[in-house]
Image: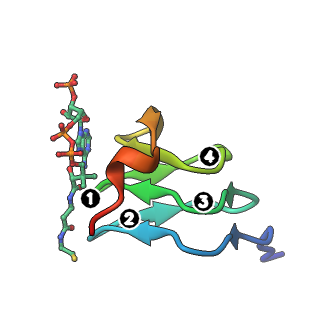
Amino acid sequence: MIYAKPITIKDNCWLASNVVVCGGVTIGEGCVIGAGSVVTRDIPPYSLAAGNPCRVIRKITEKDHMK
Ligand SMILES: CC(C)(COP(=O)(O)OP(=O)(O)OC[C@H]1O[C@@H](n2cnc3c(N)ncnc32)[C@H](O)[C@@H]1OP(=O)(O)O)[C@@H](O)C(=O)NCCC(=O)NCCS
C-alpha cells in the first residue's frame, strides 16, 4: 500500500534550493529552510533551520527585516 502523511507549510516561508520535506511535517509561519536540508521534524514558527536532519539554528527576529 502507498500512503502519504500530509505536509503543512505555513505562510511566509522560504525553502531554499533542494529542500526535502518528509511526510507529516509542519513548517511554522515565517521560517527559512537552508539549501539542501532534509526536514524530518516540525519546525517552530520564525526559525532559521538547516541541515540533514534539519535543525533550528536560530530564531528570525525584527533585526532580519530588510528595509
Ligand atoms: C539558509 C541561509 C539563507 C542561511 O544564511 P545565513 O543566515 O548567512 O547563515 P550562516 O551562513 O551564518 O550560517 C549559520 C550556521 O548555519 C549553518 N548553515 C547555513 N546554511 C546551511 C545549510 N543550507 N545546510 C546546513 N547548515 C547550514 C552554517 O554552517 C552555520 O553553522 P555554524 O554556526 O556552526 O558555522 C543560507 O545558508 C542558504 O541556504 N541559502 C540558500 C540560497 C539558495 O538556495 N539560493 C537559490 C534559491 S533562491
Q: Amino acid at mark 4?
A: Ile
Q: Secondary structure under badge 1?
A: loop
- In front: mark 4 or mark 3? 4
Distance between the alpha carbons at the discs numbered 4 and 3: 12 Å
Q: Are marks 2 and 1 in contact (CB under 8 Å)?
A: yes
Q: Secondary structure under badge 2?
A: loop
Q: Which disc number belongs to residue 19? A: 2
Across and down, in percent, residue 9 comes to 65, 70
Note whether 26 is above or below 45 in the view shown.
Answer: below
Q: Residue at x 63, y 75 (%)?
A: 11
Distance between the alpha carbons at the discs numbered 2 and 3: 10 Å
Q: Which residue is mark 4?
A: 43
The quarter of the picture where residue 18 lies is bottom left
Q: Which residue is mark 1?
A: 35
The quarter of the picture where residue 63 lies is top left
Q: Which residue is mark 3?
A: 22
| Residue that extends furthest to the front in the rendered view of this protein | 67
Label 1 CB sits under 8 Å from any ligand 1 atom: yes
- Which one is in front, 20 or 12? 12
Q: Is 17 positioned to the left or the right of 4 in the image?
A: left
Q: Residue at x 64, y 62 (%)?
A: 29
| Quadrant, the C terminus | bottom left
